[in-house]
Image (cartoon, helix red, strand yellow):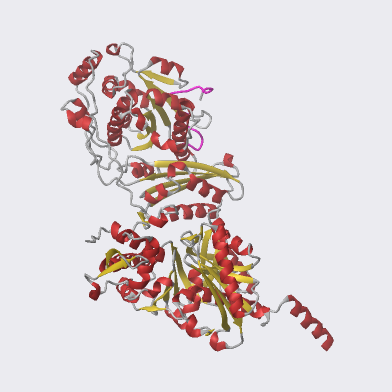
Amino acid sequence: MFDDSNIIVGLEIGTSKICAVVGEQNADPASAGLNIVGLGQSPARGMRKGEIVDAALAEECVRNAIVEAEQMADVEIRSVYLGVTGGHIRGFNNRGVHPVVSADREISDDDVQDVIKNAKAINLPAENTVVHAVRQHFLVDGHDGITNPVGMLGARLEVDMHVVHGNTNRLQNSVRLVKGLQLEVEEIVFNGLASSLALLTSEQKELGALVIDIGGGTTDYVVYADGVIKHTGALALGGDHVSNDLGHGLKVPLSRAEKLKLEHGSALVDEAMKGRTLTLTNELGLPLKTINVEHLQRIMSLRLEEIFQIVAQDLEQAGFTDYLRAGVFLSGGCARSPQIAKLAEPVFQMPVLLGQTNSISGLKSALDQPEFVTAIGLAKFGSLKTRKREGKPSFAQGIKSTIAGFLRR
Amino acid sequence: MKTKTETPVAAPESNQTRSVKIIGVGGAGVSLLDTLPGDEFAGAGFVAVNTDAPSLDASAAAVKIHLETKLMRGLGTGGDPERGRAIAEEQFSTLKTACESADVVLIIAGLGGGAGSGISPVLARAAKETGALVLAFVTLPFLCEGNRRHQQAQQSLEHLKSVADGVICLPSQKTFKLIDENTSVLETFRITGGLLVEGIRGVWQLLTRPGLIQIHFDDLCALVRNRHSESVFACVEAAGAGRSREVVEKLLAHPLLDEGRALAESDAVLVSLLGGKDLTMAEVNRVMEQIGRHCEHAQIIMGAAVDAEMKNHLSVTVIAAKHNPVAPAESPAAGQSGEPAEQAFPRGAARPSSRCMPQANPFSLQQREQTLAKNAGGRARKSGSRMRQEQLPLAIISKGRFDKSEPTIHKGEDLDIPTYLRRGVPLN
């Protein structure tokens, strides 16, 4: 059995499946310090558009996923990093300003803390809370692109923050559900952010990249440029909508539509499929209904294209289209649709790739699937957090070293 | 108001350079005038104008103008704006004298009836001729009050808009959002009136309080001119440490702003902040930033003012106007006959932006006599409205599994409806 302190668990409560990833901290820099040792998943019930609509059903599914992950990794899970999503989540950039008052105009650590505090003081609607406040760059006297201003001279220190916020109650729903299973929630993490952590290398972040995670009920996207998060968004659209459209258009039940999507779906209308039909049979093998494969693919293509268009429009409005030199990375269950990259390329007018979770070692081939990206990213987020914490000496360590210092004298 | 002695010329206060007259026209206008708290509007001249003697008697306004002619037989206008208009034309000089010596004239009226709809455009013209700036606050009738009243109100509104510098219009129907099943009729009218008074108060504060960031009256007029007929306004107040946040919250929750949706739709927004001496720039900034975020496409005019009495309080008035791309369709009543109705209320949408503009052609003496005589004869009116076929909303498309979940709305489109249906892609 592993030492529990090294175990980090990412839990994603998705609309179509619930996935728990167990990671183990290691010192190996090649794998970014995280080894995936276990994974549990369970089809989700009681979820719509990334949010819980039936807590009892959802709780059971989460329990199944956790139990499976525990068995596979042979650990006891005590705390998780919980992914959150939903159409209510928004991101925006905020700038904090702080005048440097010291006589020599040297920027001190305190100034930096103050300016960050100022940037975090944002005016949100009362029912909303901040999920993340991510630091972007400092500005000293209007000079952009400074990552560490301590020790520099200047009269005016500013910092840009990217703030992700969402409706408190709706965020708390999933936290409460997890707490009801006697699990600690270390932190809540926006799913889009988690996916981007798992997919992007620091080089890609520097170049500028867009990560789109198209899940069952929601589409989360994150823009990186100059190595920092510039923009985030969540759309309550996803694979469920594709299935729903198919059910509506082909006049088949939802469960059948879901199956058709997986078996015959394509993000682009396949020329070879034009005019082809498909006969659906009932359990006895008797023909029920004939559907047109071209229609199936057209309906699906239109929906997916629309999702990309909405994201592209949003980016254009925010003015980030020109920053994305590394291209667009797709993840989430919908990224499995055949030809999806080909569909997205003309919309974004840049290379579109299926994301790969390169930066993590462990059960590699089995894990490098688009639908696990978010959960892996959550575990990675956890490992980054704990490492940061370890960087600073803990209180106990501090006392120890002080005493040792005394003794040495 | 009730306690104060009134002179025709408003007594200018130390910090006040404009003399303002507030004129209530018609039954609704006069009673609304009475609800204005006199102490708050100290310095304004109150004038009540009506054709109906009992209503004037009940009013507490200092100056009362009873428009009367023997042809009316003391019966008022009988809900016919033509009569109101004719009588106002007849006594044009009286109205003009009443407006004299005022820099700004605020007209309050309830449109749809006879006096309010008929007299206010004429009064606005009279006030303009004396050289005053004219701003009208009017209510439109409830939908249930019937087609005819609605058309009369619309006609009068159009006319008023072509004459006055600005018209701020509150459709009474909107107050339905504020009331519940048990609200009495009286209460409802009081709420409607209260909202209008709120708006007047906001404009009043704007005009009289010393501005840190001044809004000129012209700005206000430019905002409401040539816009959609229904501007929305909201006035909210908050006190204490978190007042700037609270004010924005209240504003966004204001029913007339449709939870901030009205802000998003409007293309011109006027924001006036009034605070005590402790009003900080950061607060002003915070409020403006939040409002700005909700109306990204709008032209925003902002003003901030300080009032020593507003200690610890912050009051924000927002007037939002929508652009009016098309002139309202010709209503059947106006198109029906070649009678005075049509020429008396020309639909002059294109209007020079200068302050002195040509007037809508007034009644000739002959015409006036004709109208009065005709109406006094008590002949049955032509039925103004034809039967109309109501249209049911288009068949609602089932949203399948998303039927009961919160809809995903993006730029007004319900994205839960299949894309191929919204885009009209045929599947044959």
Q: Is residue A75 magenta?
A: no
Image quadrant containing the N terminus of chain A: bottom right
Location of residue A252 (image quadrant): bottom left
**Residue A149 x/y as whole percent:** 57, 76
The secondary structure that dominates the magenta segment is loop
**Residue A39 x/y as whole percent:** 55, 77
Name the residue rendered at 48%, 43% in the picture. B254
**Residue B354 x/y as whole percent:** 27, 41
**Residue A101 x/y as whole percent:** 62, 68
Looking at the image, is A284 positioned above or below residue B346?
A: below
Left or right: A371 in relation to A247: right
Name the residue rendered at 57%, 48% in the picture. B243
Answer yes or no: is residue B304 visible. no
Looking at the image, is B337 positioned above or below residue B423?
A: above
Looking at the image, is A192 positioned above or below residue B42?
A: below
Stretch of the chain drawn in magenta: B2-16
Query: As rendered, which of B368 and A194 lies closer to the eye?
Result: A194
Query: As rendered, which of B426 and A379 lies closer to the eye?
Result: B426
Mark count: 0
Left or right: A131 in relation to B377: right
Location of residue B113 (image quadrant): top left
Q: Is residue B10 magenta?
A: yes
Query: As rendered, which of B206 and B139 lies closer to the eye?
Result: B139
Image quadrant containing the C terminus of chain A: bottom right
Query: As rendered, which of B186 and B119 lies closer to the eye?
Result: B186
Answer yes or no: is residue A169 visible. yes
Name the residue rendered at 20%, 19% in the picture. B365
Location of residue A382 (image quadrant): bottom right
Looking at the image, is A163 positioned above or below residue A376?
A: above
Outermost residue toward the left? B338
Outermost residue toward the front? A284
